[in-house]
């Protein structure tokens, strides 16, 4: 199984996020959550306002705002 953050709203393009290395898959939920704690600012800078965490196609939680 893999986990991934999906952008849900904001002024971003998926191709730009991919080019910047901000679309990842993770082996477990803990790794995904740790990554978001480090890179949420980068996602904000690239226009992402909210994200949701998915395990494959199953929503784990979200959408969740990235704004403080």
Image (cartoon, grey):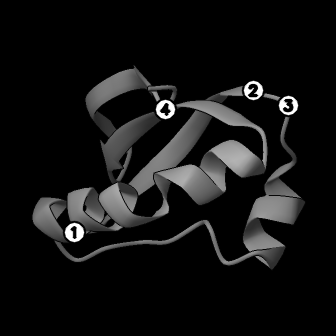
Report the side of 1 relative to 21 (left or right): left
Q: Which mark is residue 11?
A: 3
Label located before the other in sequence (1 or 4) = 1
Q: Nearer the viewer, residue 61 or 12?
A: 12
> How far, Cα to Cα, is label 2 from label 4?
10 Å
> How far, Cα to Cα, is label 3 from label 4?
13 Å
Q: Which mark is residue 66?
A: 4
* Residues under numbered marks 2 and 4 in contact, where contact means CB atoms less than 8 Å apart: no
Task: Select label 1 or label 3 by which is in front.
Answer: 3
Q: Which mark is residue 1?
A: 1
Name above or below for residue 24 compared with residue 61. below
> Which residue is denoted by mark 2 in the rendering?
10
Quadrant of the image for the C terminus? top left
Task: Select label 1 or label 4 by which is in front.
Answer: 4
Report the side of 51 relative to 29 (left or right): right
Q: Label 4's element?
A: loop
């Amino acid at each position: 199984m893999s986990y991934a953050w999906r952008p849900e709203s904001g002024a971003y393009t998926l191709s730009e996020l991919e080019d910047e290395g901000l679309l990842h898959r993770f082996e477990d939920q803990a790794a995904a959550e740790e990554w978001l704690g480090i890179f949420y600012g980068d996602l904000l800078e690239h226009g992402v306002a909210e994200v949701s965490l998915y395990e494959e196609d199953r929503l784990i939680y979200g959408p969740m705002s990235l704004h403080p």
